[in-house]
Image (cartoon, rainbow, N blue to C red):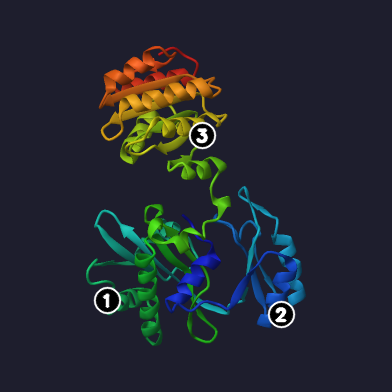
Amino acid sequence: MKLHEYQSKRIFAEYGIPIPDGDVATTPAEAKAIAERLGRPVVIKSQVLVGGRGKAGGIKLAKTADEAEAVASQILGMDIKGLTVKKVLVDEAADIRSEIYLGVVLDRAKRQVAIMASSEGGVEIEEVAANTPDKIVTVHVHPLLGLQAYQCRNLAFGIGLPKEHIREFTKIAQGLYQVFVESDAGLAEINPLIINGENKLQAVDGKILLDDSGLFRHKELAALRDPDEDSPAEIEARASDLSYIDLDGEIGCLVNGAGLAMATMDVVKLFGGSPANFLDIGGGANAEKVTAALSIILRDDRVKAVLINIFGGITRCDEVANGIVEAIRTLHVTVPFVVRLVGVNEEEGRQILAESNLITASSLSEAVQKAVAAAKGESA
């Protein structure tokens, strides 16, 4: 789950990270009022959950309150990469003297949290890593000890930060680490963290990506979800307790287990197909849940075939088969189904499916090849 810039920065402030003064507006008049309160030049920033806002014209400066109103009227309602701007952040304009990147992420290979800093702030960290990797300094945090002051100093010295800023930088880095850990985030970054005209550090932009699996512990953060972030299908799937992500392929995938779903999509690509979605119905899925999942898949006009790959453990194959039959009976099915059932009650499941007009397979590779052929209108 992504948070907007203004939401991320408000959380930063709770952990002692200095941010610019400002507020969110949904109308030009509100933007003018905020600018009048600030009484100085402001920056109007579109709040949409995509990158490249500046290049799209979604970030502009305004010197006066009247200009802020005019700029906000231009940005509100803009389309940026398919998302409509409904809110703008009106912040005091920063006097930027220097820019730094500071980010916290989980390093899965080392099984530790990694803190990254770079003197190349304001630039996408992927671009820095590709072109000037030597300008990225990284430290790893012991999960029991937490981020130590000496590690923050190593980051500061590594990016050439002036000595008078090291104490403040340490406070900010430790605050960002706490944000990451205590919110169950997958990413927390400040880009850029600036040295301003008053020779102080300030977070003028920020991003937090939350781990959906941890949201049950953070009801207040879950409430911040922007409904425009997800497609209608993803919203419906969440209501049915399904893990679903829209993709752009032609083969609808229904699988139980995230790992098996990823492997299934890999094999689809291997045999020349393209998955239309990631969909994990989870363990113990019943017929009702399978029907709901297939209903979501079948509403996607891009889907030319549906691939069902079930490994029966907690999930019973006969329950899945009942769900498939119910979906075919109640939904408008116009695409071929390829089904592979293996595991608990697989024989019962196959008997239930035998009377339906379905393509079956005993192995994943066989099922995928049949689904790819079916999507192309060929016989496997």
Camera-nearest residue between 251 and 215: 215
**What is the distance, in whole Å, between disc 2 and disc 1 at their CAs?**
42 Å
Task: Name the residue type under label 3.
Answer: Ile
Q: Residue at x 29, y 79 (%)?
A: 149
Q: In the rendered image, which quarter is residue 138 located in?
A: bottom left
Q: Is residue 187 left or right of residue 149?
A: right
Nearer to us of marks 3 and 2 is 3
Q: Position of residue 113 (x, y in %)?
A: 30, 63
Decide: few, some or many residues near mark 1? Use Cα within 10 Å; few <14, some 14-19, many ≥20.
few
Q: Which residue is located at x 61 percent, y 58 percent? A: 55
Above or below, comparing residue 37 to residue 252 in the picture: below
Q: Nearer the viewer, mark 2 or mark 1?
A: 2
Q: Amino acid at mark 2?
A: Glu
Residue 188, compared with residue 16, is above or below; it is above
The earlier-in-sequence mark between 3 and 1 is 1
Residue 40 in view here: no
Tell me the residue that label 1 is attached to.
148
Camera sees residue 191: yes
Instruction: State the SS at label 2.
Output: helix
Q: Earlier in the sequence, mark 3 or mark 2?
A: 2
- Residue 241, given in percent of the width and then of the height, sits at 43, 43
Q: Which residue is mark 3?
A: 296
Q: Are marks 3 and 1 in contact (CB under 8 Å)?
A: no
Q: Determine the residue positioned at 44% across, 12% down.
A: 379
Q: Earlier in the sequence, mark 2 or mark 1?
A: 2
Q: Amino acid at mark 1?
A: Gln
Where the C terminus falls, by quadrant?
top left
Dot 2 corresponds to which residue? 36
Label 2: few (<14), some or many (≥20) within 10 Å? some
